Image (cartoon, grey):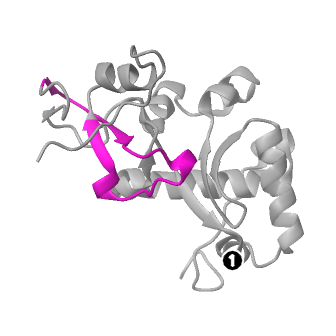
Amino acid sequence: MSRLLINEYPLQVLPTLAIAIGLNEAIALQQIQYWLAIYQEKKDLYHFHDNGWWVRLSSVGAAETFPFWSKKTVLRTLAKLRRESLILTNGQARTSWYTIDYDTIARTGLGNLLLDLEAYRHFAGMECPVPQIARCEKCNTEYPFLEQHHIVPQSIGGPDITSNIINLCPNCHVWIHRSLDGGKKTNWKRDE
């Protein structure tokens, strides 16, 4: 006998989380956590940005995931999670990227609800999702992890495609963002 009445993926309600942040917010936050876990398990690097795992969700995708809510309710729920700093977002109005801010959860007293805060910090991307030795494309030094840098920044319309990304060690990545050349834009190109 199945535990489910209908053969579809269930959404989980965590009662303690619902009491702490609200029912709708708890359902949405747990669903984001579920997707993040899947992407990390699959090592789906399309969803790995800015040293963490992110979920890409459009308004259409949100309506399909939460068909029992109106579009306004979905937007209001995500806005409340953002206002309370429980999630971080990056994107445009129609499609955004979402991730959970585990440090905020820890600071707000919800941290005692997490099963293992250190595991979540690791999960959030503070360690490399694909453990291997790789070479920085700038300094050619071997590192156990590299960071992706957009040659043309996304903030000014640069695409999120392989040809616009170089893999840098943390030192070179910091250097490029805090350029020592008087704030001039540095033209970084992939060595070919």
Of residue 57 and residue 180, the one placed in the foreground of this image is 180
Relative to 77, 189 lies left or right? left
Of residue 74 and residue 150, the one placed in the foreground of this image is 150
Q: Is residue 121 visible?
A: yes
Is residue 19 rendered magenta in the image? no
Q: Amino acid at mark 1?
A: Val
Residue at coordinates 52% horizontally, 58% vertically from top-left? 35
**To which residue does mark 1 refer?**
60
Q: Residue 123: x, y in percent?
A: 44, 38
Residue at coordinates 72% horizontally, 57% vertically from top-left? 28
Of residue 19 and residue 83, the one placed in the foreground of this image is 83
Q: Residue 114: x, y in percent?
A: 61, 33
Q: Secondary structure at mark 1?
A: helix
Q: Is residue 156 above or below residue 117?
A: below
Is residue 165 rendered magenta in the image? yes
Residue at coordinates 25% horizontally, 42% vertically from top-left? 189
Q: Residue 25: x, y in percent?
A: 79, 52
Q: Residue 106: x, y in percent?
A: 66, 24
Farthest residue in the bottom direction? 6
Query: Where are the magenta residues, as a range?
Result: 141-167
Of residue 37 and residue 137, the one placed in the foreground of this image is 137
Using a 10 Å C-alpha cutoff, classify the residue at mark 1 as few (fewer than 14 neighbours), some (14 to 19) or many (20 or more).
few
Relative to 68, 186 lies left or right? left
Relative to 90, 84 lies left or right? right
Q: Is residue 43 visible?
A: no
